[in-house]
Image (spheres, rainbow, N blue to C red):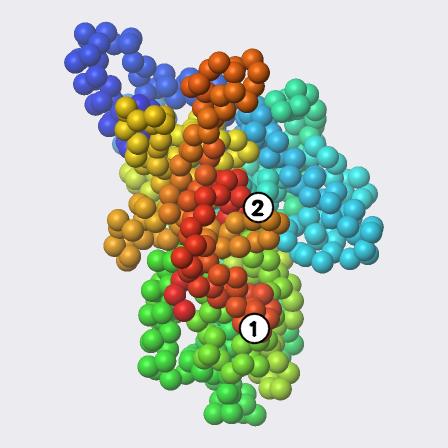
Amino acid sequence: MYLSLQLASQEAYNHIRRATIRNYAHDDEDSILSFYNVEKLVAQYTGVESIEHDMCPDSCLAFTGPYAALEICPLCDKSRWDQGKLRATNDRSKVAAQKFTTIPLGPQLQAMYRDPDSARHMQYLHEHTQQILAQLRATQSIPVIDDIAAGWDYLAAVLANDIKQDDIVLMVPDCWMYVWIILNLSPDKRYQKVHISFLFVGMHHLAALQKNGLTIWDASRDTVFTSDLHLLFTTADGPGLVYWDGMVGHSGKNGCQGRRKTGGSHYYPALLRPADRCARALHSPSVFLTLAILATFSSDCAAADNPATWDWAVLKDEDTWIAHGEAVEKAGVYLPGSFDRKPRNIAEKLNTSYKTWEFQLYMFGLAPALLYGLLPMKYWQNYCKLVARIPATVPSTCSITAMLLGTRIRAPLLSTQRVSAPFVRPCKGPPICYAQWTMERTIGNLGQEIRQPSQPYANLSQQGVRRYEPPKGLPEGAVDVGDGYVLLRNERAFLRHGQQLPRIRKWARLRLPNGQTARSSWREKLKPLEKTRMSRNVKIKLNNKIQFAEVLYYTQLPVNVAGQNADNSDDDNEWHFENVAVVQMYSMPHKELLKLSLQTLVSCTLLDDILAIDVKNIVSVYRNGPA
């Protein structure tokens, strides 16, 4: 009941508990644990508890360290204590007017290692690092930059034995609310919200762990070791960045190592030295958009620039731009739900509330297809070169924009014309560790979970503890078929009792080892297209070749193995079930288009061929939309 109501209020739990006790437990109060006792049991089981400290009612500072003995905030002169309770008790009861919550990092990490599967996941960074080092020794190069393990600074620390096999590497985006990102996990698990906690003050705790080490029991190896913790990156939003690196805020009077747009009030650090003056002081992530979109802005370009000569500015026509935005929105239904939030109409939302994740999906997922035939071929191919350099899994592994921010950016990408675009606002953190989308997603999750804004700090602490509850088992009715593949519910029997074969069930969904859920046309086509996040198109591996297919449904086909074993030769009712996906095949990709796009755009035709394949031949779910 507690787990089912984790997004509801404490009052809702108490109401359901009282009703259940009154109707089914004969008013036995001890038959169902109270909310307090459940929370206490969870904290005892996981070892994860929240720690509360007093803070200024206006969140100016925390009454810790040198401020621990103060009763008045030195910044705003407000009292530390709840004035209503203070007056009601004649100054005898001093209760903090506001508290902030710290969820210590150490117990969270220890809880992760107590689960064998989670402990094995924590070995990813070491294993991936060893693969990169082996490749580096063999070829003297790193062909694919797909994670932080490929960074020279990180590798140097590993080679110097500063970062060892069992050490834990962390990253912290934003400031007023910490989000610990555990880089030991593989990218497809690193950003799942169960691995993201939120802290208000945790650096002192981290410093203590770095000084003494963290003792951990690894359930997967049944060993105890001491891990050193390394803080690899610290990032922040604009106001928070001032406290991390000491730079001037973007509205500061005197900027650091940058300049202002002519006549403007905001300071911008420079990525490139301006050729003459900036084309436009773009704020991230707009600076990363394809140059076709850049032309839709009202650019105050240098005198030598003539927008009329920009043949790559294909979206400057209003009708074309509106149609392009509608195409982006319509393409969203073909993005699987595992791709997270689908991009909205970019023509309507670009300058207001377009999220970082939407930009990434647009630029590296949709734009190569939507700009084909719209951009002149030489620019389109050059744009595909950029997309091809970014691994297909980048949105879930490392920040695309982190890689771009570390490179020199010129517009357009070809050298036939040149327009400088050198500035980026410091609102998303240092270039090397851009991770704004993580914080955006976390804030969205918290808004859904805490629900009641009257006590946000208390609610945040409880959600933090709940996120580190013991791992849950499989959903009800699910069937684990091994190697990370799980058949999920929404099944239906399509052979009835009384027939010779055993009862056979038809399944609608399959969970893949990478965490994606592959669905089927059997169930997806029951929904209107506009309410669908199409997840039935899958990449499969047959005869060591990658092919594409649409899943019709999943099933377990019975195979009679009677007589195959000498010990059971007299048993005519032995059945073995094969887990299969019934799929409709796509043709092989269009070779010419695949070559022109440098493997970034695949065009296939749905065939009439229907096959039954082993579910373990399914590699992943991919986006597939109409041409």
From the viewer's side, name the closer residue of 182 and 557. 557
Q: Position of residue 317 (x, y in %)?
A: 38, 84
Could you classify mark 1 by the number of other residues whose Cα lies within 10 Å: few (under 14), some (14-19), or many (20 or more)?
few
Which quadrant holds the C terminus? bottom left
Q: Position of residue 561 (x, y in %)?
A: 50, 24
> Among all residues in the image, which is located at the extreme left?
23
From the viewer's side, name the closer residue of 365 and 242. 365
Is 81 situated left or right of 159 in this image? left
On residue 272, the disc is: none
Q: Can residue 604 be seen here? A: yes
On residue 187, the disc is: 2
- For label 1, the residue is 592
At x 49%, y 40%, the residue is 615
In the rendered image, the vertical position of residue 44 relative to residue 6, given as above or below: above
From the viewer's side, name the closer residue of 28 and 303. 28
Q: Secondary structure at mark 1?
A: helix
At x 43%, y 54%, the residue is 609
The first of marks 1 and 2 along the sequence is 2
In the rendered image, the vertical position of residue 433 relative to residue 602, given as above or below: above
Q: Can residue 79 be seen here? A: no
Q: Secondary structure at mark 2?
A: helix
At x 48%, y 66%, the residue is 603
